[in-house]
Structures are given as C-alpha cells and as structure tokens.
Image (tube, rainbow, N blue to C red):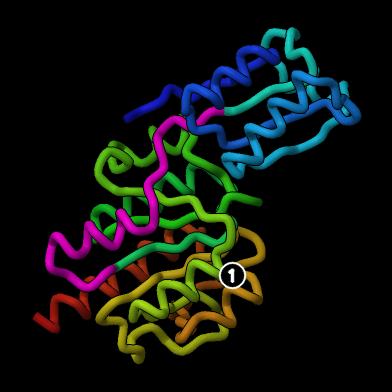
Amino acid sequence: MRYEELTIEGRNAVLEAFRSGKTIDKLFVLDGCQDGPVKSIIREAKKHDTIITYVSRDRLDQISESGHHQGVMAFAAAYEYAEVEDILEAAGKKGEPPFVFLLDGIEDPHNLGAIIRTANLAGAHGVIIPKRRAVGLTATVARTSAGALNYTPVAKVTNLVSTMEELKKQGMWFVCADMGGETMYRLNLTGSLGLVIGNEGEGVSRLVKEKCDMVASIPMKGDIDSLNASVAAGVLAYEIVRQRLLQK
C-alpha cells in the first residue's frame, strides 16, 4: 500500500489519521497543550511508537501550511514500512543469505533515496532505518529512489543496536564503513551480511560500531578525506556483490 506524503493539521484530522492506520512518521504538539483531545492524540501516537516532538507556537506556525493546526501537526509517510521479518523472508524466498543495509542516522532524503536505489540494484533484500534522528520515507526519498521503493522493503526500528543483536542470533554478521578500518578488499564480505552506513557528518555512532564484526575502509587517493554517504554505500555494496559473485 502506498501513501501520499501528507502534512496533517488539526486535532480531528490527526486523530483520524492514527485511527485509520496511516503511517505517521512524526507528530508535533504545542508545548504545554494537554487538554482532552490532545491527550487522546498523544495516546494514539505512543500506541504506534510515533516520534512526538513538543514545540513552541512560533515553531508550529512556521511549519504549518494552513495556519489552522490547533496545536497539533503530523507528517505521514509516503510509503508503508515493512517489518525486519519481511526482509529476511524475502531473502529466504530467493534462497540467498540475507544482505541488508542498516542506516545509522541518514538525515538527507536524497541520500536515503539514492541508497535505497543502490540497495535494490546490488541485490540487497531490504533496508533498515532508525525511527529517531533520521529521515523517513518522504516523497523526496521516493522520487530519488527512482522506483526502487516499490521493490525494496524498508523497515523502521526503535533501536538499531537491539535489532543488530537480534539479527546476530540468526547468524548475521555486520560490517560498517569507517576510515580507520581494514581495507575492504581484505575482508570476507560473503554470507549473511548487514552493511552499516553512518550519518553524513558523524559517521557510524559508537554503540552501533561496537556491534559491528568488521570495519571496512574504502581506499582513497584524492585530496579530501571522505565520500558522500550514498556513494560510500555504493562502493562497499558492490565489493560485497563482487565477492558474492566469485563465491558462486
């Protein structure tokens, strides 16, 4: 099922969006507003584990399109999210060891869309993103993915570290991109594998990096010291593809 990316304003509209099953990425609530209808909306948001941000009236007025927000606004996702289990099932149906992208705090929708496109073309079975401090499936992400979102499931999880721990129990290994790691050509990147790509500015967070089994660096010969997140994802993904092809 596909949703239009939608800004929902007004108490009744936001409450109805939750109750109708729309995927809500973020809820903005006027700080200090705690009357009955708003409390009902917050209960629904917590039930769906939606991110709630309390903001000033000036901030709410600034992001409102209509000016009639009544103290609450919500942003609905452009696409429905998958579950992590759906990604593993997709690998099982193809008879392949799981190959999954895990994105640690990607905030630029163009980067996320480009990475989803790369994941699809590299044969990855899905993408996992965190709920907080990261962009969701916006219309910009959908456009940048060039249709890949129609074929590549994206799961959104509360805690990336916990998700990695659960996947490790199922035999998955993790490699993250970091300049201080081992050159990617020297690593065994075959088998059931999760490729972890970090935030555009800060890279992979410390806790996520600690859960990775391997740290891979991309050889660079130029005068600057880093690649765009989506480009780094593409380079590492195709080293994984190369090694998988050699294994056949």
Q: Is residue 54 above or below residue 69?
A: below
Residue 181 position within the rendered picture, expressed as x and y whole percent measured from the top left:
51, 86
The x and y percentages for residue 7 are 59, 20
Considering the image in quadrants, where does the N terminus appear?
top left
At numbered mark 1, what does the secondary structure look like: helix, strand or loop?
loop
Establish if 199 lies above or below 13.
below
Residue lying furthest left: 248
Residue nearest the observer in this picture, 123 or 30:
30
- Rendered-image quadrant of the C terminus: bottom left
Residue annotated with mark 1: 204
Classify residue 10 as left or right of residue 196: right
Return the residue found at the far right.
Answer: 32
Say if 14 sits above or below 197 in the image. Answer: above
The residue under the point 38% across, 33% down is 143
Residue drawn at (60%, 67%) of the image = 203
Q: Which residues are magenta?
A: 76-98
